[in-house]
Amino acid sequence: MIRPPARPAPAGTVYFSLLGPLTAVRDGRPLPLGPRKQRLVLATLLARPNTPVPVDVLTDAVWPDDPPRTARKNLQVYVSAARALLGSDSRDGRDRVVHGCGGYRLTIGEGELDTLRFRSLARAGRAAGERGDLRTAARLLREALDLWEGPPLNDLRDSTGVAEEAERLEARCLTVYEDWAETEIELGRAAVTVDGLRDLVERHPLRERLRVAWMNSLHQSGRQAEALAVYDDYRQLLARELGLEPSPAMAALYRAMLGRGRTARPAAAGREAAHGTALPAAPRDFTGRREELRELLALLGSPDERVVVVSGPAGSGKSALALRAAHLLGDGFPDGRFHVQVRREDGSARTPAEVLGELGWLRGERAPGGSGVPAESAVTAASAVPTDSAVPADATVPAVSQGAADAWQRWLSLHRALIVLDDVPDEAFVRGLLPRSGPSSVVLTARGQLAGLAPVHRIALGALADGEALELLAKLIGPGRLRTDPAAALRIVRACGALPLAVGVGGMRLAVLRHLPLAEYADRLGDPSAALDELVAGDISVRLRMASGWQDLSADDRRALGRLAGPAQEGGFTLDGAMEALGCGERAAIRTVESLIDAGAVTSPAGEVTAHAALYEVPRLLCLYAREREEGRFSPG
């Protein structure tokens, strides 16, 4: 049975349904859709409404193996039949299906296609939930789910192309069901979700978010033993099938249930992470970078830019810029915005499989593509690295299996999402995670230039302008205090190298030491032997951040930077100065300096200039740290 659209269309309008078998009705009566190949063409066009569908995509959907020589002519016949079925656009009398440079485009409205209505209701429900109006959210999400008649396009899934579109639609339906169930649980109405969740878990046994919601619904319904059994069954299934354990979040929920604690909130947190809010809080003290932010927003809003690299020395505010942009771009990425920290707290790199697994969890799935299979299963038990272990710099990083990589690429090709991969160590780490096609975008932050990646757009961050650095300091210590001694405030930000991290740490220190005159603190920072000791606020240490960047450098680059730090402290160095400090010839000096530029330890002029005329610089605080290492005055523990 086809449910009528929630927004009635004019009499005589054809209403299509994809959330089940492909069907169409006009004025309540079903319409014949023709032979199978004609239905495949129609289903492919409807699965991508109001978007050009390339002829090759249609051809692959109808003839996946060996299209005949008459394929294009046959497609024209099938498209013509679709035009006749759809009729003309009532607004301007034009054909609903037109051919352009991008392929065939089918124009259709929300009141004519169940997937468009489904998407509209789901978005409205999520928006209501974010506002805290849970009753409205539950009602709208339930209305969306009432359009779901079964596995989408289940009568045409023997076509690979249609099957991929159907899997994408089913993944969205499952996610909305999870949204609805978690909302009902928060409202204290868990009993209405239990049976439906049980049925879906039976069909998708490895989809963890469904299991979490089912556990919560049983627990809230007073069925404690059954809730705990859901976890035990899942743990045994993962161990038997994949050699894995449930996620830490699910394990924490299980422990909370053992203690009979309130457990609705973990489910809510899972839903929040799965839909566009899987980002750390926006940086409250974000200052400056107006041109860079404008450029980044423009790039991410362009259909032609899929990967942007934001590079700069440690403490230059790369993460803050990427997160600021991600928070401002909510409407542009309807399938989510996700942030993943690529390194552990000790500075060692995580594995690509771990990053892929976290992305699956943030989307409410254990694997890309909505299959429910943990992305970590791509790594064999022998090669898997525990999350809390350090990976030596010379160790072989476990690779993501080809199947997991293909699933991730398929998900990216079918969704418009924004992924921020923060603090990337090198190009090899991220190559398999970057989109090869589709509308998703990735922002990479890295100290190095990641020169081996192409094609990408690059935004390089340096020091803040004096005015921006003073603005940041004023936010932390108050504009009144800054005005008491603006000259000393300027000395402070310059002694910090005008790096956002250092200015921020200095500002936090001054905010606590209210008695300390700005001039005295400026004097302390001006002393090269004491500056890094002064830039500590609680557990935040600029020296430790510099140490992390130092560990990224090769042994040769560390030695070279230690020797160049002296000349760099005197206002920069030329190629001749580098040759003298390094004790080598011109060609070797050029290679060394350019290696340090690639690693993000040395900055060069923005415009074109010959190697001999260029003035190279090293951020002041990195200079101070390099001198400490060269002189053996500090060894990070």
Image: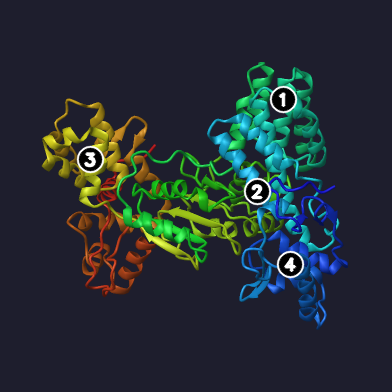
Mark 4 falls on what kind of element?
loop
* Mark nearer the viewer, 4 or 2: 4
* Residue nearer the viewer, 359 or 86: 86
Residue tagged by mark 1? 190
Q: Dots 4 and 2: beta carbons under 8 Å?
A: no
Q: Residue at x 51, y 46 (%)?
A: 339
The label on residue 87 is 4
Q: Residue at x 57, y 48 (%)?
A: 336
Q: Residue at x 75, y 45 (%)?
A: 147
Disc 2 crowd, CA 10 A, few/some/many (<14, 14-19, 20+)? some
* Residue nearer the viewer, 199 or 357: 199
Q: Earlier in the sequence, mark 1 or mark 4?
A: 4
The label on residue 531 is 3
Residue 216 appears in the picture as rendered: yes
Mark 1 falls on what kind of element?
helix
Please determine whether, in this image, residue 123 is positioned above or below residue 599: above
